[in-house]
Image (spheres, rainbow, N blue to C red):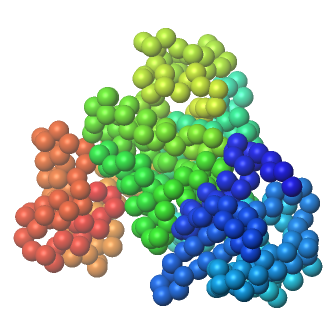
Amino acid sequence: MTEQADPTGKTFEARVRGLLELLGYRIQHDRLVAGRQTDLVAVKDVFPIRLLYVVECKDYSRPVGVDVINDVENRLKAAAREGKYPNAQGWVVARSGFTSEARDYAESLRIVCSTPDDLVRSLIDFTSYLNDLVHDFQGFVVDKERGLELPQLYVEPDAFHDPQKIQPLQTLVDEWLADPELNQLTLLGDYGTGKTIFTLKLAHDLAQTYLDGRGVLIPVRIPLKEFDPKQEVDDLVMNHLRRHGLEGSPYAAFRYLLRQGMLLLILDGFDEVTAQVTPELTRRNFDKLDALVNERARVLLTCRTHYFRDRPEVEALLEHRAGLPQMETRQGTELYQAIVGRPNYRILYLREFDEHKIVEYLQKACGDQWERDRETIRSIYNLEDLVRRPVLLDMVVKSLPKLRERKGEVTAAGLYDVYTGYWIHRDDWRAIMTAAGKAAFTEELAWRLWTADRERLHYAELTDLAQELLRGDHFKPGAVSATTL
């Protein structure tokens, strides 16, 4: 049968050869077996055994039948009699699969039957990784004192591509995933509007669907705080997979799965990469990540809005225009210019919570007391503006007892003061560090970062600083495990 071109533009046999090479096989092409040319001979050394397969590639429009299996078996027997490939096994790869009779017959002869999809699925076993993604969301504790986890409190945010059409964010993401012409989605939102939480929820849902056998898209969620700007993207990906136990996974296999549209790569927090580098290095890092977007790859990138467009310009533009037109260079940042004109890219903007979302969260977080707490929020000057951001709303809910005692206006800084006071005194009965010690350590840390013109500190430096300031190893756990830092 004449080979037909597959969707990647390669012949079927070439595609199978490429997949076997990704699986670690050395391939011999067009070898004679029992006097007849065979498609491929695949060899792989798995100490102390050498695996050797005679591979037939069948690009048929119908399932392969018993006749093909019988032909492969006869050729293996003939080759064994000639002393050539005496230990070889048969392997048939068929585009349209096999009849049930052919599979049963092949199994009795120890001939392997596979489709290209079977080979693709065997490149990397994501099972344990997907279970991690499910746990990351389900086990995310939002309020330890009340035992509330993220699934109990999650509120679906709204977003828009066209500012005249506000929709649930998940609806817009589903539309993007369903559009074969769109490869990359950039999700922009200000601090605390729910970008990271949404990516946790999206990764959870796709992972659970895949594990249940109802989905075909495998999510890979990488927090970009893991990205060292001096790294290459393959290091970022492979270090992330290794941290989740996928030690032997080749980067080439990951790239293949991504290009084939089998993965959704979620890169969360591009602002984490840009915080301490020059605009030139920011663009270079963006280009590194952008290089992943080719063929049928799906990549979702989250970032704070101002790294792509200045906030006043965003508001002015969206107030008067229904779409997101191409802009003059002076109107948008360089990153925005890098993607706005591309037909396969889309930008979504997260909205802050409206009244409906605020009430929904309070009902989940405060139970029967939600109406009282809603009135308290309304009664404290300036608090109403703060609670539109989910992260600040969560802080407000946890800080309400103390906020009720304050007089006058509550600013974001005042809220942080109350909230960090809540952290400093929390679990005080079992803490090694006193409340005063926590406060002094945090203030010194902030001062050193400020005077050094730095925004972050590696955890190894934090340990050294704790040793210096707190005079003794027994103080370090309280400092270096404090997530509020």
Indicate whether 157 appears above or below 476.
above
Residue 320 image point, x, y percent: 61, 13
At 20% across and 56% down in the image, what residue appears? 442
Locate residue 254: give its quadrant. bottom right
At 13% across and 64% down in the image, what residue appears? 464
At 74% across and 75% down in the image, what residue appears? 34
- Classify residue 212 as left or right of residue 105: left
Indicate whether 53 appears above or below 422.
below
Total tally of numbered discs in the picture:
0
Q: Tell me the quarter of the image containing the N terminus.
A: bottom right
At 53% across and 14% down in the image, what residue appears? 327
Residue 178 image point, x, y percent: 75, 43
Indicate whether 247 appears above or below 430.
above
Who is closer to the viewer here, 365 or 212?
A: 212
Who is closer to the viewer here, 138 or 308?
A: 308
Q: Is residue 368 visible?
A: no
Who is closer to the viewer here, 306 or 358?
A: 306
Q: Tell me the quarter of the image containing the C terminus.
A: bottom left
Residue 388 image point, x, y percent: 53, 40
Locate residue 450: give its quadrant. top left
Residue 179 image point, x, y percent: 74, 38
- Classify residue 10 as left or right of residue 476: right
Q: Is residue 52 visible?
A: yes
